[in-house]
Amino acid sequence: MLTREPLLHSATVTRQIDYGHGYYVLEFDCPDLAASIGVGQFVNLRVRNDYSPLLRRPFSVFDVLIDRANNPSGISLLYHIVGAGTGLMAKMKEGEKVSLNGPLGKPFPWPTDDKAAIYMVGGGIGTAPFLLQAKRWMKEAPGREYVFIAGGRSDHDLKYMTHFSPLTKQGLNLMLTTEDGSVGFRGRVTDPLRGELQARAKKKLTSAVYCCGPTPMMAAVSALCEEFDVTCMASLESVMACGYGVCNGCVCAIDDATKEKGWRYAKTCIEGTCFDARKIQWKKISV
């Protein structure tokens, strides 16, 4: 069992990789946390020890790092500078101590169809959960087909895709899309996904889709999957101040036939972050 109750961990920064245009991968030494992370789980990071800013920042675990003895030794986080918190993260140096809370959220569930091809669809920084998912699942179920469709506005948003290169040599089908066509397919992630799902439907082959990214993108992926009657799981990018169901800041509206209104608010941090996309009331989620 990879998961357990969330704990506070003292971690040490071991490397900061700058991919330009505000994109970074930050690596930490934290063996206990690394050994307990499941696919799709996240951590809450205190970006500065003087509590300014006060709230922790939630990040999907990008990768679990392995030492020379093949034991989990640390984790890495993919992030993009968008505000004060991530701006402070970019200034973190090797040897700096930070506080991490995790593992948080539930691991991604396997599809019930053991023959379904796995499609991972990420937009922007929403690509973060899929490196660990691809690594773990390709090892645990090598007989499946695995496809990762990653999208950005331009090639500047996808420089860190080099982390996926070893997996492409092991069978991962990596498809890049950019709105300006500077790398990969010109367009959005739904364009190649439509072609893939259509081709498999004609051959009567099953698929399962996992998506993460901006809300409009995930809503579009969900609608496309519904069109082809394909299961879609969406990992929501909610703001999670506490990470364990106390603050209620991360709630999302999901269908629930047991409720009088036919829906209820779910706490993304403890019931998700991954939900059946067909049950999400997308119009009630703020962009």
Image (spheres, rainbow, N blue to C red):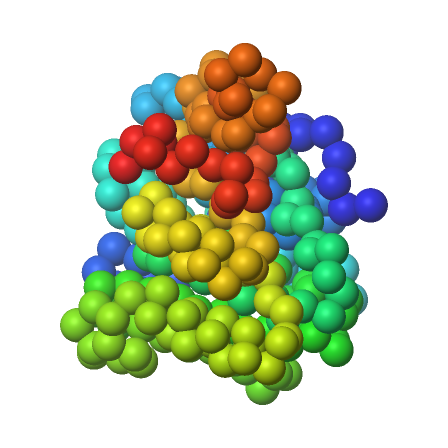
Between residue 182 and residue 234, name the one nearer to us.
Answer: 234
287 sits to left or right of 13? left
Residue 32 position by quadrant: top right
Residue at image location 69% in from the left, 65% down from the top: 137
* Relative horizontal placement of residue 84, taking residue 131 as reference (left or right): left
Quarter residue 149 falls in:
bottom left
Number of disc labels = 0
Q: Residue at x 50, y 30 (%)?
A: 254
Residue projecting furthest to the right? 1
Residue in the picture at 21% in, 68% down: 179
Q: Quadrant of the C terminus?
A: top left
Which quadrant, please, contains the N terminus?
Answer: top right
- Expressed as whole percent of the image width and height from the top left, the position of residue 106 reads 65, 38
Q: Nearer the viewer, residue 280 or 103?
A: 280
Percent position (x, y) of residue 201? 55, 74
Where 60 sits versus 164, above or below? above
| Residue 198 at x, y percent in the picture | 47, 75
- In the image, 191 versus 44, the foreground residue is 191
**Residue 140 percent across, percent down from the top left:** 77, 67
Q: Say left or right for 40 vs 214.
A: right
Q: Residue 195, relative to residue 240: is it above or below?
A: below
Which of the pair 20/159 is nearer the observer? 159
Quarter of image, res 20:
bottom left
Residue farthest left in this picture? 180
Judge whether residue 215 can be spotted in this image.
Answer: yes
Q: Is residue 15 visible?
A: no
User: Residue at horizontal 56%, vertical 40%?
Assistant: 275
Q: Is residue 76 above or below residue 178?
A: above
